[in-house]
Image (cartoon, rainbow, N blue to C red):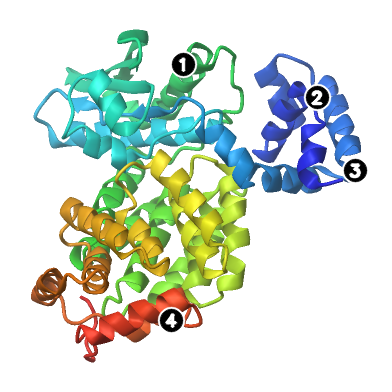
Amino acid sequence: MSESSDIDRLTGRQLEILELVAKGLTNADIGELLGCSPTTVRAHVSAILAVLEVSNRTEATARFLAACARPERVGVVLERPAIAVLPLVALDDDARTDTVARAIARDLTSLFARACWFPVISQISSARARTVATTSQALGAELGARFLVDGALWMTGEMWRLDLQIDDTTRGHCLWTERFELPAERIFDVLGEICARVVAQAYPVLVQQVQAGLASRPVAADLSAWEIPHQAMDLCAVRALDANQRATELFARASARDPTLVLAHYGAGLAAYDAVLNQWAGEGEAARDRLAAAADHCLALAPHMGEGYFLQARYFQACGEHGRVVPALEAAIGRNPSFAQAHALLAQALHVSGRSEEGMARMRHALRLGPRAFGAGLAMLHFMRCEYREALVAAEQAVTENPRYSFARVMAAVSAREAGEDARAAEHVRRLRKDYPPFLPGGFSRQFGPGTEGVRRITATLEALGMTGAGRIG
């Protein structure tokens, strides 16, 4: 009997408990969340082990996560109505209010995603949608989301005031709303609890049942340690050398203040990989070492979350160990089916390993969760499939979203060349060389696997465009 069919034999209650076990909760924690005794939970766990024919919780968790990562199971999740957390509106002119508002939105997005009941649109897509649409119906259509979490934050005296609401975009009305007051001097002490309460209150409204599984969220010792990595994540999104270096410094500061802050280690890993991907000068070996360290920290601090496995996959890719990338990404997705970046990277890894159609299915998963957020990755996948027109459209959309994203500019140049658009290819090369020294084809080839036909064609096209100098982007 297959692992997937073993999981299918579990009852709804057993699946609910197994998911909580996979999140690292104890029997006492699960009993508190589900309103039953630890003894009852222990009986359910024993029954689960018997059905799965495994001897302990670790093996049961591995079986559950492997099943959750299967494309057909992810597809079921992504067919459900999606939710998007919009950037909260800062109602005063204090720069810190804007920072805290964006950080709250990111935390809410992460908490909804980890509940894993229905798909959660990525924060970067939600932020972009705010600039092109205003009504809830228009925002929902732009993001492919039925439910929108929106709100505002402002300071009054010594208190932060937070208004939140959830709208149903298909019906055009508000489903849930609440106001919170947070003491200015203790905002970080209570904010994690507030975010968890929002998700716990909203879920019964959204899915008609209580979705347990919000384990206590560890917090840093002070507000600064929490604010710093959120600011750094915004810098990472710029995808430029100067912003990346500043983000790396901020992540290091945050983890020094609170070594248990998973977001700081995860962000440091993302910044390190961007340095490798974009071939920023002097960053190769040092960036790979930082990436490996970040992955290890995330796996040690939060093995029930997907971040550490995602960074591990990035590290394997950066080292050319392509056979180890897919299992690590499946582990990440098994823990969080709404992990858009993991789906996008898995799409590329599957194509490289000869599973092109499955790779394109995974890319559709990524785009469902992050509309307009994975243009460069989609362009690369189309290019490797010889779909040059589609690659050009995706790459130029990514360049339009962020003109400083050097990897997207490279993909636009090679896609235009292969699509017969020589003038457009030359313009992309001109813009690339204006902002950065030449991109090294050899570095690109090492990154994505020189034995892959699609990668060889990209490398050859880069060389044909004259990107053969000794310099690197940056």
Q: Which class describes the residues within 10 Å of circle 4: few (<14), some (14-19), or many (20+)? A: some
Residue 431 shows which numbered tag?
none
For the residues carrying marks 1 and 2, which lies nearer the camera in this image? 1
Q: Which residue is mark 3?
A: 53
The tag on residue 41 is 2
Q: Amino acid at mark 2?
A: Val
| Cα distance between the residues tagged 2 and 4 | 49 Å
Can you say whether 13 is above or below 447 in the image?
Answer: above
Quarter of the image where one finds residue 22: top right
Q: Judge whether residue 259 can be spotted in this image.
A: no
Q: Amino acid at mark 3?
A: Glu
Q: Amino acid at mark 1?
A: Ala
Estimate how packed mark 1 is, as few (under 14), some (14 to 19) or many (20 or more) residues with alpha carbons within 10 Å. many
Q: How far apart, in angstroms, are the residues tagged by discs 2 and 3?
A: 18 Å
Q: Amino acid at mark 4?
A: Arg
Q: Is tag 2's residue or tag 3's residue first in the polypeptide sequence? A: 2
Would you say the residues marked 1 and 2 are in contact, meaning their CB atoms lie under 8 Å apart? Answer: no
Image spot of residue 226 (x, y percent) = 36, 42
Residue that label 1 marks? 202
User: Which mark identifies residue 446?
Assistant: 4
Residue at image x 30%, y 54%? 375
Mark 3–mark 1 contact, CB under 8 Å?
A: no
Q: Quadrant of the C terminus?
A: bottom left
Mark 3 Cα-neighbour bin, 10 Å: few <14, some 14–19, many ≥20: few
Residue 330 x/y as whole percent:
60, 53
Seen at 64% across and 46% down, the residue is 70
Give me the C-alpha separation between circle 3 and circle 1.
36 Å
